[in-house]
Amino acid sequence: EGDGKERSTAADRATSMRQMFESVGAAKAELEVILDTLGELERGSLLTLGAVEKPAKSAPAKQRARDLAVERKAQQLSAISAAFREAHASLSSKVGESEVFYRDLRRLHRKWKVQH
């Protein structure tokens, strides 16, 4: 049973690391696009002069936009919450393993005069 847990923990850790590296890679690609765009703007090749007017939104369109923004935020918070719950579970299991080890060590110290 212990081997299975260790393997699943290692697999979970590997999956988590892979997802982290994929996220970093995606963020790096987005940053490169932003930096390229800023470079183009500084050179003036994409810079246009003129007023840009946004079309006025109707009240229902504004409400839909707010609802979508709220829904997106709720999804983001849900994902963050899930990540925190997973991290908490992982840390709790590590602390539990540590407590068991030190409890066993204290028991050994009481029964056997172990020298360091």
Image (cartoon, rainbow, N blue to C red):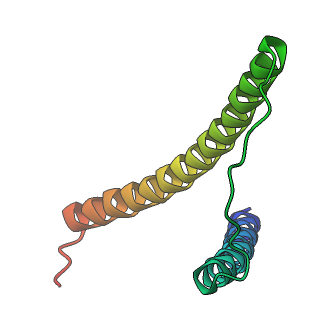
Name the quarter where the N terminus is drawn: bottom right
Give the residue displayed 68% in from the left and 66% down from the top.
Answer: 9
Q: Nearer the viewer, residue 64 or 22?
A: 64
Residue 62 vs residue 102: left or right?
Answer: right
110 is higher (above) or lower (below) than 34:
above
Figure label count: 0
Q: Where is 87 relative to 67, above or below?
A: below
Q: Quadrant of residue 63?
A: top right
Q: Position of residue 80 (x, y in %)?
A: 61, 45
Front in this rendered view, residue 9 or 69:
69
Residue at image coords 16%, 82%: 115
Q: Residue at x 72, y 48 (%)?
A: 52
In the picture, the quarter occupied by the C terminus is bottom left
The image position of residue 61, as x and y in percent, is 83, 20
Q: 104 and 97: which one is in front?
A: 97
Q: Is residue 81 left or right of residue 113?
A: right
Which residue is nearer to you in this view: 59 or 54? 54
Question: Looking at this rendering, what residue extends furthest in the top direction?
Answer: 59
- In percent of width and height, residue 79 lies at 68, 43
Q: Give percent across and percent down for residue 113.
A: 17, 74
For the point 78% across and 29% down, the residue is 68
25 shown above or below 76: below
